[in-house]
Every structure is written in C-alpha cells, then in structure tokens.
Image (cartoon, rainbow, N blue to C red):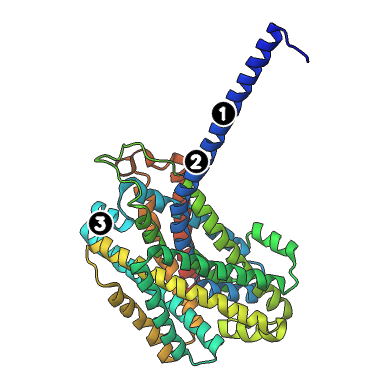
Amino acid sequence: METKSPTVAAFCSLQDAGSEHSSIAIQIESKECLANKSQRFQRLLPALSSAFVASVAYVDPGNFATNIQSGSNYGFTLLWVILCANLMAMLFQTLSAKLGLATGKNLPEVIREECPKYLVYLMWLIAEIAAIATDVAEFIGAAIAFQLLLNISLIWGALFTAFTTMALLLVHQHHLPIFEAIIFALVSVIVVSYIVETTLQEIDWKGVGYHVIVPSFNGNESILLAVGIIGATVMPHVIYLHSSMTQGRFVPEGTVNVSPPSLAYEVAGIVIALSIAGLVNMSMLIMAAATFHANGKEDVTSIETAYLTLEPLLGKAAGVTFAIGLLASGISSSAVGTLAGQVIMAGFVRFSISMWIRRLVTIVPSLIIVFSGADPTQSLVISQVVLSFCIPFALVPLAIFTSKKTIMGSWVNSYITMVITGVLCLFIVGLNIFLIVSSFMG
C-alpha cells in the first residue's frame, strides 16, 4: 500500500480543501446568478405588460386600412414611413413611461398642473376627439371582421363588437392579469396571422429592403396616406395611457431628486413590443403590395375588397386568416381605447364616469357611421388623419415636460433627446401643414 510523505499529504489536504471551497463558491455564485436572473425577469415583466397593452394601439384596424391602401396603390413605396413612425413611437412611449415613473403622475395630470386653465380644457377637448377617432377605427374594424367571418350585416357585426368589448372590459375590472394575458394572446393572433399571410405569396425582398431604407413619395395622395400611417402608428391616446400604467411603480418621496431605478427595463419592454407591432404593420403593407399592386389590382382600397380579393388570389385560408387578425385587432384595441379615455378625462378635468357609460358614449359615433351607410374603410382612413392632427397636442407637452428638471429631476431628458424630440415634433406639425396646403391647392 502506497504511503504519502507528510509534505505531499499536506499539499493534497490543502488541494482538497481548496476544491471544496471552490465548489461551494461556484454553488453560491450559481444561486446568486439564478436569483439575479429571476429578479431581472420580475422587473421586466411589468414593463413588458404595459408595453404590450400600449402596442395594441399600433396594430389597430386603422393600420389595416392605411397599410392596405398604401400597399395596393403604391407598392412598397411607403414602407420607410412605417419604419420612421415606429421609431418615433418607441421614443415617445419611452418618454411617456419615464414621465409616469419620475413624477408618479400621468401626462394629463401634469398638463393640468403646469398649463393655464383655458389651455387645459382645449387640450382635453382635442384628446377626447383623438379618443373618439381612435374608437371609430377600432370599433368599425372589429364590426367588419365579424361581418366577413360570420357572413352577417355590418350592423350585426357592430352589435357583436359592442358585446365583446364590454365583456373584455368586465375582465379588466375584476381580473387584471387575465385581461393582460388576453391582450397578449390577441396580439399573438395578429402576429401569427401576418406570418401566415406573408408565407402564402412570393415577395420581392430586395424591393422591400430598398423602400424600407430609401424615402420617397408618389404624388399628393401618397402624402395623405403617409400622414394616415403616422396617425395610425404614433397614437396620442396611448401616450396618455402609458404614463398612467407606470405612474405607480416608483413614487418619489417628497422630491423628484430621489435616485430612481433603472429605465432599461421599460426601454427593453417598449422596444420588444413595438418592434413586433412594427413588423406586423410592414407585413400588412407588404402583403397588399405583393398580392394586389403586383397583380395590377391597385383599386383595392377597402378592407372588404381586400378580403374578397385575397380568396381567389391566395385561397380561402388567406381570407379567413386576414379576418381573424382584423377581429383580434379591433376587439383588443377597442378595450384599450376605453381605458385611455378614462385616463384622459380623469387626468385633465378630475372628472370620471363609469367605464360602462364611457364605452356606451364612444360607441355612438361608430354606430352612427354604420347605420348611415358610410364607407367604413374610408371612415377608418379619415379617422387616422384626424388622429395625426391631434398628435402634436400630446407630443409637444410630453417633450417639454420631460425636458424640465423641476418636473423630472434626475430623469430629465439629455440634450440629444431634447433635440431629437423637438425635431420630430416639428416634422409631424410640418407634415400636417403641408397636407392642408396641398389639399387646398387641389
């Protein structure tokens, strides 16, 4: 039997002890790593939840209408507008989330405290117009989807939409986590629908890549649609809503100079959710361009025509998939729009009404349009242009307030962020002025 010298035995003993300590250290480090990962996920989850609820507004039926018209009339030309609008949306949603975190108040509440009374009421009126325009698009979109799927009249589709959104709001009132899970599921349905749509046709990906990067227009009508795309993407009502969803997560204790938590989780959630929404919007336009414009069907300007034209070109599955995505979009965004309306009224004028009454009131304009026999798709596009005119009244105050250290403390915008937000606000206002001048000049 081999024996070890005292020196070798001592060395082996130290090595074994070191190995044991090393093993314990690795185990501790692994547990800490897992704990940190779990903690990071727990902090990311609320940010993802609010971002996905906000993202619903970026894939609403108004997007279907403007993207289908843009793709069928001008091919891939306006893809770059969707990209730019989506990047703008990410920035402004981040600023909205940051305002709620830094101040413990939502944007309408800050406007009420910082602006003269007459301006507060004016901005409240404009915000309500934006909320109504949004609700018209969402409600009519869902009604059209019911009409297409169930082969019923648009009136019955509108009634089914009213019932479904009421049920979803009831879930929100009593089971918020279930509501958020339903919203996530509906967004997933929209995403899957357009993944299926794009796989059913041949697409010129070189043309897609070119028009995503290179800005261009094709006449005044394309500018009108570009404004509609921006109005359908950068949504004023959801900017108000996002600040209310984050306002309770970090409340400064008597001063805005309390050291805040990292904003990285909010940014990550917004980038993930809105990137998905942006890809869906691009897929809508790509589908319309590859299916309609490429086949000489440039007169496809309505959702109903798009549905009916998809079937002979790509098969019944394509039409049904399209309608299911539209239905998920309309129902989810209509419920979110009602929540935003509650925030707008309570924040601006400290007045709140029952969510059910508000839902009934906002249904009325949509029902008037449906019963009047007006072209529903054209109503959707006009609602998006109205939204685009309302955008500056949400974006400009947001840009100003998040740049004030007295309001934001250590969360205040950097100089670069101030410049970028200022330029973007001027761009949106300038685009709207150009649209008005072009319209009057014929």
Q: Residue furthest top?
A: 6
Which disc is residue 24 wearing? 1
Between discs 2 and 3, the one toward the N terminus: 2
Circles 2 and 1: CB atoms closer than 8 Å: no
In the rendering, at what x and y percent does residue 115 appear? Answer: 25, 54
Secondary structure at badge 1 equals helix
- Residue indicated by mark 2: 35
In the rendering, at what x and y percent does residue 135 appear? Answer: 40, 75
Residue kind at label 3, given as amino acid type: Arg
In the rendering, at what x and y percent does residue 73 appear? Answer: 63, 76
Which disc is residue 310 wearing? none
- Residue indicated by mark 3: 112
The residues tagged by marks 2 and 1 sit, at their Cα atoms, a distance apart of: 16 Å
Residue kind at label 1, given as amino acid type: Ile
The residues tagged by marks 2 and 3 sit, at their Cα atoms, a distance apart of: 42 Å
Name the residue rendered at 41%, 43% in the picture: 413
Of residues 237 and 333, the one nearer the viewer is: 333
Instruction: Judge from the rendering whether residue 371 lies leftward or rightward of residue 128; answer left or right.
Output: right
Name the residue rendered at 48%, 41% in the picture: 416
Q: Is residue 102 above or below residue 349?
A: above
Between discs 1 and 3, the one toward the N terminus: 1
